[in-house]
Amino acid sequence: MAAPAERQVRISRVAGRYLVFDIDDVVHIRRHYGICAVLTGTMPQNPTQNLFLGLPIELHAEEARLLVDKGAGYIADELTDHLSQLSVMDASTRKAYLQHLKQQRRNAQQVFDEEKAKVQAKHQGKRKAKPAAVTETTAAVTETEEDTSLFDTPKPPSTTLTTTTPKEPSLPGVTPTTSAPLIPSPTPPSPAVGIPRPANYPLYNYLNARGYYTTPGLRFGGDYSVYPGDPFRYHAHYLANSYGWDVEVAMLDLVASGRLGTAVKKSFLFGAEKPVEEGSGADGGGEGGGGGEVRVFCIEWAGM
Amino acid sequence: MSLDDDDNPSLALPAPLLSPSSSSSSPLPADPATAAAAAAATDDLTAEDLIEDEGAASQDFRAFAAALQFRKTAGVSAQTIRRGEKDFEAHGTRAQADALEQSRAAMRDVLSYTRVHPAGKRGDLARGWYFPAWWEGYREEEVGGEEGGGGGGSGSGKEGREGEKKPFGFVRERVVVLEGSSVASQALGRAVTGQAKDRPARGRDWLLPEEALYLVERGSLDLWWPLKGLEELFPPDGTTEAVKEEGAEADEVDEYDAGFPLSLQAAYALLIGNDGERGKISLQKFQVYSNLKRCGYNVLRAPPTVNHPTTKPATTTLWQWFASLLTRTPHHPPYGPLVQPGLYRSYASIYRQMTLLPRHVPSATSLTTTTQPAMRDPFTIHFHVWKSAQKWSKLRHPPPDFQLAVVDAQASAVPTGGEIAALLGATPPEPGKPEWAGPGRLYARLKHGYRNVLVAVVDHGVINYMRFAEGRFGAEELYGRFDHHRGGGGDWVGVGLAMIPGNVIVDSIISYYLLK
């Protein structure tokens, strides 16, 4: 998991939650840092289903902290950034942003045109292939062709108002996913906004350092579901819970989680971080993430 | 639109979308050219068919996604579709690595989609302007004053009054004004009525933050940051045509003169906030909201409960008192038989004497009168949810199908009895379907409960729904049934032998025969 150090992932903090909006960032942290997180947004291509979700992804605080610790990302407080940028916007930024938008709109238009051309070509091909085709299909074809031809002409409906300067036949509007052109990333990514160390961080860090991927463990009643690799390919092996070093774990919790884990073909994993003693060196090994040693145990229901 | 919106694309694609091409080719099986053409069409994917079905106007970038072969996007969510195809662990083969790369590439391609709002019909462009401070000083009570009383009656007489009165509008929370009317405004947004004629943007629909963000995310709304005031954008005069002309002219000069579009990221930044912030919604609540909306439910914010529990109890306790007079709860002497000796003509009177333990009988008022805990914040009813129905509208709708609270998985624990009681007390009784009456559907009734409330638990974007219901075991008296199929007198005693403790039976039998 050697990662190119140059890319800085912008982790948006919105109301205490950590989100990532840039698809390149999402792919980057997935590939190089073993963080897949959860896609939470509605997919605009297909907005009435819950199987495939889109951007943004929501990170655990542990994941955000890990990225910051590894120097791969920075936390940005989106609200203050946006408000400060939006309310007092200098002309050059605005111009650049609008230019960017316009470019995107042109691209969209281009894609539209290409698709339209393709459709038309296809229809024409069909027509030649079967001149005596069924009336239904021809009707459909002509209909759609009318439709498309109507769109080829530069907006006939509102010609009364336009002065018909044919510079831009009203480009489609675009909602960009990120505000990247609007809010320039800070050139020296400032770790000004920090993250308090979450309680589960040692265990998370331990798992992540060993190449495990984690997703929220709500479905199995744990802190995480732990995957041996990218969840695209693998099933979860463990459901993990993090405890404090001196916390007395109720036996029944172990039984319950152990049985549950076995029932869903996973094993129950739990771990804690040994507190660093005063005398010994502060950085006790790289894997602990600045803390002490992490011990991890696994419980499986033997059913003997 | 409906075709590919419906379901997961990889499942929906093959069957319905291929049918037009195959049906068109079927009448001419003899013609080899057509058959070949049809085969070719099916071969080089169905992207074109998709476009054909949608019409070129509304297809936007979807063609992009379609050209990616929807099938591959199955990797995007991994969990459900590819369950059978996943491996146990890495075995270092290239096939495995390739499959993973494909999944990643598909995710990347699909998610790089940019939301596009087709040009052309200018009037249909759904554009929202962000005016967070416009309704800040608005006091909803002025308009919804009686509405508070109506909300108070939500315990019992809900539909009668609320059908007339508009539901609570959360006007202070509304931050995005909708320009033009779109399909979305049938179910979302609210025009604030009762405004003076000279107010700007009169009659416009205003969106709540979750509604606006949901629409933006869905690609149905273009959210703009205004550079001009609301007065300039929507002049107070009612002449909408003038507004439009002006807008069109402004387009010619500089379409970004009045403002500019915001990104999805900016929309999140502006519309997501902490609980209790005006004009914002917490991320967890928004995730639940959009999850339900994607499923097709109608979701509205639950109106605030104003002095709900305090109004009713006085009258209802009176009723309860009357009821208690009628049933005459038996008084037990400190010794002696549990069931007093005497003549009994029904089982009900015997069993009534035997009920020693108090039990919970759900009634329309029981929860609110006995315990009156107020709902505390995580366990509060946040949303009202309706199953999708034709006649539902944002202003006129039946009582909600579900009442929902949203909690965070990390920040909250299992609710205490008091919290659940408060939640249930705030929901109207909902004893189940009318056809569940009678002994045959006893278990359906028990399972359904008397009132119920849903709790959505959110763990970083993963949502689980839980249902808490008020048990109604106390309302299901089994002994009432014994009296129904009573035959003659002998039969009556025979059944009694099996059911009643010894000494009581002896007593009652003796008295029975003595009287005979």
Image (cartoon, rainbow, N blue to C red):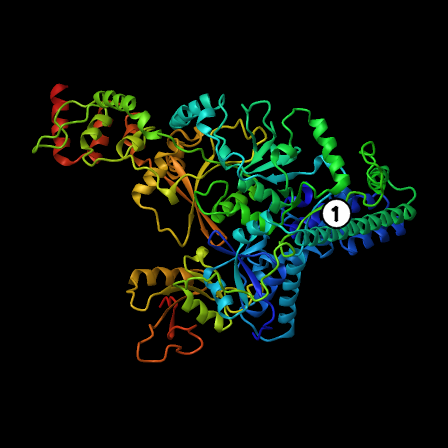
Residue B107 occupies quadrant: bottom right
Say which quadrant the N terminus of chain A sits in: bottom right
Say which quadrant the C terminus of chain A sits in: bottom left
Helix or strand or loop: what does disc 1 sit on?
A: helix
Vertical comparison of A134 with B42: above or below: above
Residue B388 occupies quadrant: top right
* Residue at the spot 28% in from the left edge and 65% down from the top edge: A248
* Percent of width and height locating residue B450: 37, 34
* Residue at the spot 66% in from the left edge and 63% down from the top edge: B105
Chain holding disc 1: B
Q: Which residue is mark 1?
A: B50
Horizontal relation, residue A295 to residue B326: left or right: right
Q: Is residue B487 visible?
A: no
Horizontal relation, residue B136 to residue B178: left or right: left
Horizontal relation, residue B258 to residue A209: left or right: right
Q: Going by the picture, which residue comes out furthest to the bottom?
A: A280
Between residue B36 and residue B143, name the one nearer to us. Answer: B143
Vertical comparison of B38 with A143: above or below: below
* Percent of width and height locating residue A103: 74, 53
* Percent of width and height locating residue B516: 15, 19
Between residue A4 and residue B16, name the one nearer to us. Answer: A4
Between residue B222 and residue A116, name the one nearer to us. Answer: B222
Mark 1 Cα shell of 10 Å, populated few (<14), some (14-19), many (≥20): many
Between residue A141 and residue A60, name the one nearer to us. Answer: A60
* Residue at the spot 60% in from the left edge and 62% down from the top edge: A25
* Percent of width and height locating residue B487: 28, 24
* Residue at the spot 41% in from the left edge and 73% down from the top edge: A290
Horizontal relation, residue A140 to residue B222: left or right: right
Figure label count: 1
